[in-house]
Image (cartoon, rainbow, N blue to C red):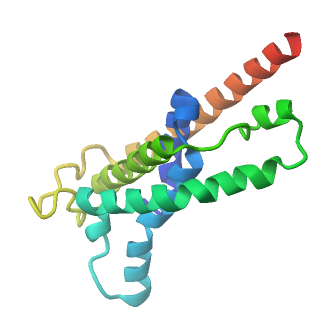
Amino acid sequence: MPFTPFHMGPGLLIKSLLGGAFSLMIFGWCQILMDLQPLFVMISGAGHLHGFSHTFIGSTGIALVSAISGKPLVNWIIFSKSIGLRKEDRKLLGLDSKIGWLVALISSLIGSYSHVVLDAIMHSDVQAYYPFSLENPYLDFISIEMLHNFCLFSGVLGLAILILVRYIKHKQNNYS
């Protein structure tokens, strides 16, 4: 994947299905953290492009860092963006509640593990099960074009569901 944007498609779909039990911002933060190691390798030319960060063991560590750093960061963003908004507007924009530790952990684990699998489908150097196996069982599971289409379609579908759900909730609140 060419960095984070493609990974956000499935994240949008997951957010639309799980609602408040999933934080898209923490998921996105995790995507950024996952790609820091490959970025460092691209800049420095030293190391394995999809190294330890793109293993399930390494990505678990990144998920923990993402949850621990992402929870206060996202809650600060929610707080700062909701200053001066009416309760109804905060709710409509999804700024009506703080992210808890369980949501932060679930969001970051989904983010890191999905990142490994999506990258393993298109990159031969991903060794998801290292140190137990150096094989990449996900490679070419589907074509790269199909993978990109899946990520784009899931993002469009997730966004459509999110907009529809928010619209329905907004209409219900206006008639209550």
Task: Look at the image and tell me in which quarter the N terminus lies.
Answer: bottom left
Residue in view at x 39 percent, y 58 percent? 64
Residue 173 picture location, percent across and down: 82, 17
Instruction: Give left or right: position of 112 versus 15.
Output: left
Instruction: Give left or right: position of 77 versus 73.
Output: right
Residue 52 picture location, percent across and down: 26, 69
Residue sitting nearer the eye, 168 or 84:
84
Q: As drawn, which residue projects farthest toward the top?
A: 176
Residue sitting nearer the eye, 10 or 171:
171
Determine whether 54 is above or below 40 in the image.
above
Task: Look at the image and tell me in which quarter the C terminus lies.
Answer: top right
Residue in view at x 80 percent, y 22 percent? 170
Residue in view at x 17 percent, y 56 percent? 129
Determine whether 59 is above or below 78 in the image.
below
Q: Quadrant of residue 89?
A: top right
Number of callouts in the render?
0
Residue 21 picture location, percent across and down: 52, 34
Residue 78 picture location, percent across and down: 71, 49
Residue in view at x 65 percent, y 30 percent? 162
Determine whether 86 is above or below 121 in the image.
above
Q: Quadrant of residue 126?
A: bottom left
